[in-house]
Amino acid sequence: MSKRNRQQPIVENVTITDYAAEGKSLVRIDDLVVFVPFAVPGDVVDLKILKKKHSYAEAVVVRMVQPSPVRAVPFCRHFGICGGCKWQNLPYEKQLEYKRQQVIDCLTRIAKVELPDVNPVLGSQETVRYRNKLEYSFSNMRWLTQEELQEMDDPKTDVRRKQPGLGFHIPGAFDKVLHIEECWLQDGISDKIRNAAFQYSVEHDIPFINLRSQEGILRDMMVRVVTTGQIMVLLQAKAETPQDKETFMGLMSYLSEKFPEITSLLYVINNKCNDTFGDLDVHVFRGDDCIYETMEDLKFKIGPKSFFQTNSRQAHRLYSTVREFAGLEKDNVVYDLYTGTGTIAQFLARGVKKVIGIEYVPEAIEDARVNASLNGIGNAEFFAGDMKDVLTADFIAAHGTPDVIVTDPPRVGMHKDVIDVILAAAPKRIVYVSCNPATQARDLAMMDSAYRVTAVQPVDMFPHTQHVEVVTVLEKR
């Protein structure tokens, strides 16, 4: 046996028992916790151990001995490679059960606070084509599957240089892009636009970016499709010469002519070494510089740099839950922390005296102000800046003590300074919206001396993934 094979032993007839972090399943072998992707609890499998640490290991399935009785058939041709929808092999009702258990585990093991019963997860009415935003990467050297390599005359030859791709990054690899032919996450028009852009670019020899050397022109494509039917498409290109830009403009013209339904066709010239464009100008090639989403009688402007919940219809259920849990009264002052484009703030504004929204991204705050004006909301004020710098005792003194605070932080949760200011402000109720139950649990523990948890409602924004949103209510003790 070679040294490599000795380092990667096969363990036979193992029964997968549960799910763990990052959507991986797990099994305990002796005293070792083994994490396995794309397996389902109840599967009996043979595993190859890839990586072994002191108390855990990582493995992959090399043979299915007996499928789990709850296993579902994945519907996407890219399942198992893409990594975007890791739970397609699990029925949706089972996904919701595991997500609820994930919330319970985090709140009990990390927060260690007194809890009410965690409500069943509010499932998404749409489990496919539910996303309003997707981003695709160009690469001049796409990822080839094992099947594709086996079909080639010499699989050891690095033929990827002749195989451009437009799709998603392979998990954990910035320079490996899986070419996507069909994606079930977004409306079918997204597939048509992406595939047309790919085909035109290949036929006209437009260089795709080399993600290591940064040579090439085409970098990135973003597609937004909202319930109003409006479509935004933004392409990024590296264009250091007039010839590069002229070549790129050929693609833009083609998309403009082929897809008149695109209402906002935009582009960014990005000569940096990454695809972030928050600090770059966005140019309008055709149409408007934004699109609009609606919820109830509210209208929301979404620009190319705006944050907006990517599942529009389920976002309405999320925000309605927040409004219900906030228990608002007409004379209330409400603070909406990490307000984004002010969506939650405007859901709450008409039932209270005043809403104060704070957000780090200046462009999002500009959109929030425009949205408030569009919706005739005059009792909402919005401020841009780092939360720990904006939300201070002086700020609260100037704008009023909050009766209710709604906070919807990023995955890392809230900075301790922000928690300290919230505790000092002492609102009677806090509604904490989180996309990461683990960091929410950590923050709840820091507020436990002053607040008790009275309600926990998980909401599923991302079917077929391990992610879950949690709305938690804290009442002042």
Image (cartoon, rainbow, N blue to C red):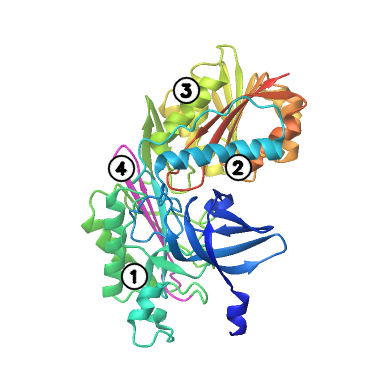
- The label on residue 360 is 2
Do the CB atoms of the residues marked 4 and 1 lie less than 8 Å apart?
no
Which residue is under mark 3? 377
The amino acid type, in three-letter code, at marker 3 is Ile
Task: Kindly indicate the quadrant of the structure image that contains residue 415.
Answer: top right
Which residue is under mark 4? 230
Which residue is under mark 1? 246
Residue 367, x across and y down, in percent:
48, 38
Of marks 1 and 2, which one's residue comes earlier in the chain?
A: 1
Helix, strand or loop at disc 1? helix
Image quadrant where one finds the C terminus? top right
User: Which segment did they paint magenta?
Assistant: 215-240
Residue 135 among magenta residues: no
Of marks 4 and 1, which one's residue comes earlier in the chain?
A: 4
The amino acid type, in three-letter code, at marker 4 is Gln
In this view, the residue in front, 291 or 451, is: 451
Task: Tell whether 301 sits left or right of 257.
Answer: right
Of marks 2 and 4, which one's residue comes earlier in the chain?
A: 4
Q: Is residue 242 visible?
A: no
In this view, the residue in front, 238 or 425, is: 425
Q: Of discs 1 and 2, which sits in the foreground?
A: 2
Task: Tell whether 149 sits left or right of 465.
Answer: left
* Inter-mark Cα distance, 1 to 2: 36 Å
Task: Tell whether 356 sits left or right of 266.
Answer: right
Q: Residue at x 49, y 38 (%)?
A: 97
Helix, strand or loop at disc 2? loop
